[in-house]
Amino acid sequence: MSQSKKDLKVVLLGNPNAGKSTLFNALTGLNQKTGNYSGVTVDKLQGSFKYKNNSVSLIDLPGTYSLFAKSTDEEVAVKDLLSQTEKPDVVVIVLDSTNLQRNLLLATQALDLGMRTVVVLNMIDEAIYQNIHIDIEKLKDLLGANVVAIDSRTKEGTEKIKEAIVNAEVSRNKFFDLTSTSDYAQMVNSQFESPYKVELRKWEEDDKIYRHKNIKYIYGLCVKSPEQLKLKERSTKIDRIVTHPVLGYLVFMALIFTIFQFIFYVAEYPMSWIEDGFMALSSFIKTNLPSGILNDLFSDGVVTGISGVLMFVPQITFLFLFIALLEDSGYMARASFIMDKVMRKFGLNGRSVIPVISATACAVPSIMSTRSISNFKERLITIFVLPMVSCSARLPVYTLLISMMFPSTIVLGVFNLKGIVLFGLYVLGFAFTLITAFVMQKLLKTKEASFFMMEMPVYRVPLLKNVALGVINKIKVFVFDAGKVILSISIVLWFLSNYGPGNAIEEIEKKYANAEYPHVGEADPNYYTEFIASKKLEASYIGVLGKAIEPVIKPLGYDWKIGIAIITSFAAREVFVGTMSTIYGANGNEKGIQEKLMSERDENGNLKYTVAVCFSLVIFYVFAMQCMSTIAVVKRETKSWKWPTIQFVYLTALAYLSAWITFTILK
Amino acid sequence: MVHNQPIYTIIRVFIKPSGLANFVKYIMDTLLSQLKPGEHAIIKSIADNAMKTKLIEMGCFPGEELYITKIAPFGCPFAIYVSGYELSLRLNEANNIVVERLN
């Protein structure tokens, strides 16, 4: 069969935790890409390899426990396997050798589909280490299919699997009750006919019990394991600590703290390198290429946009490095185990803890990290509430406004008042994160039946290659999917702030070209350029927009200048500070901007930035979804504009309302 | 899954015609959630609802032996060793499984 040159479509089918991705990585190496399944939030991992005369395209199906889907992931896997239009040529069933009994359920189901099949005994080295002896020849005989064992760490057996794939055959044996049906594939297919019938459910249950009995027989003949019905000692010992009522939480906190340190502090170094590098590139383009609109577009619009996308890469790298290590080692299931009850009260999942904590650094990587929450409803709630956790981009805004409210240092006992207010803002964000989650849990209805039973995998040393490839895939997805949206929005924002209706901008340039304004440029020569920059921004489309939204934000105590800063800070919250300093002509100097704002007076001569205005602004920034990157990444993770839109409307309304209440009370 | 809570089971058995028989059964039966860590048991039956299919799929079916490996702080979830691996169940899931204690 393998003599002629052939294109083979092969799918990897297996339980979650069976080591499918390890095998996938071993077979395809870097020849892989992440795609989409239409309409669902599941990623499609595809790869390819060449063997002899065959070019094989390989799809790593989402993990599933059986061919009767119980979740969106499983449905995707089963539908892809049974696809009529792109029917796979060969099915590779991946089994965890240390957990054969349960893994064989899916294997016997897949063998009954009558497709060309190869059975892979994954992690055979681990089974040998655990004193589980598998008689492969006997298993081949009983399953009626080719069985190949592989040591996934040394890659021993990879060639054998490739050989087996091109020579795969249909199983000779049947494992279902022949008195109940003659066509198993048809029965499996009928699960997608709506509504799912009670008779089919009964049939499915009987079928599975029938299989379990068959499997017991097969297992008994092929597997010799001296200590049956006993957990592995290593896992039990570790679990005694990590699921301990006191020690367990301490270990968890320590791990969270480490992750936090990395994404908050360590990531800052590479982030500033990226920023500096792109700033240098921008000024290089400005000075060395012919000037004009195209030059401005590239040096200011595009380069800044790309830098804005790549800035997230260090944080994403660190967060996913840790998550992959925790997930692959088996610890994540334990963290979920001890956190589940607490988090569930708020409609969240044990696995929501890490995203929520890492959102204090940045919502973007933490929204991407919700992928490990298998229940769709809980995952959606987590994504929805994450932007309310105060991230590091809010910190410059908070700092500026708090110092304006309390210019002198007031100390209450051992506490600094500014510190207390800052802490209060974080608490406020967290409180609404939990409240919103709680309400959403009550409101949200999903079609998907919710099961929370979860395998507690045995501990394993993570494979570096798996971790690295996982992190690389995440970065690719972010840069190429969410990056597109971020880049487009930042180019639009660049255009809006540099161009105005008609020739308004040129007129400003002409007007101030001959510096005859007596109050301008007396002492500081920079003052003059800053003054023009401020006037230009006022005349730009953004300036026009800022003035247009003034009636809307007036009840919150804001004028059009703040309006401009709110619009530009949609790029990222910290841009607020930069824009304010441009408007008030205090470029880059934080002390300067604070003084300028505090001495600003309205037309009646009263101070403009009162405590009420500053407090209202700070509250606005606690809730408002002022971040295009978050919107882009939510769109990417939920695969539609529906959720980012709802989220944006909700958070903006919440921000507006609470800022209005704050301003009205303090006024 | 409110209807799986023991108190609702008690109320329900008095409303239904076969109430008394069910009540006696309920008193006699041991639920998986009543076991302590380390206790071995055999699965006798599983409440008949959509969860049953999933439980069977995960290796919990009548006749299979299991034992509780650990219970999380605050009493939920439960971790059991069944069909050659460790499985974690929430309380409402553990309440669906009727077992018989082994010595």
Image: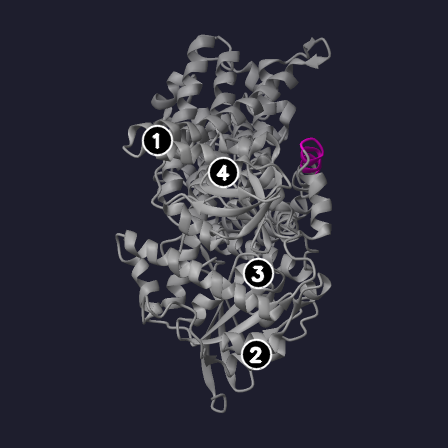
**Amino acid type assigned to the residue bearing label 3 in the image:** Ala
Viewer-nearest residue: A218 or A89: A218
**Residue matched to label 1:** B20
Secondary-structure class at tag 3: loop
Label 1, label 3: how many angstroms apart (C-alpha)?
47 Å
Is B73 magenta? The answer is: no
Q: Are discs 4 and 2 both within one chain?
A: no
Residue at horizontal 51 percent and vertical 82 percent from the top: A166
Secondary-structure class at tag 1: helix
**Residue matched to label 2:** A162
Pointer 2 with pointer 1, Cβ within 8 A: no
Q: Is residue A610 visible?
A: no
Residue at horizontal 57 percent and vertical 82 percent from the top: A163
Q: In the figure, A258 relative to A458: above or below?
A: above
**Residue matched to label 3:** A18
Magenta highlight: main SS? helix
Q: Which chain carries label 1?
A: B
Task: Name which of mark 1 and mark 4 comes first in the sequence.
Answer: 1
**Amino acid type assigned to the residue bearing label 1 in the image:** Leu
Viewer-nearest residue: A384 or B5: B5
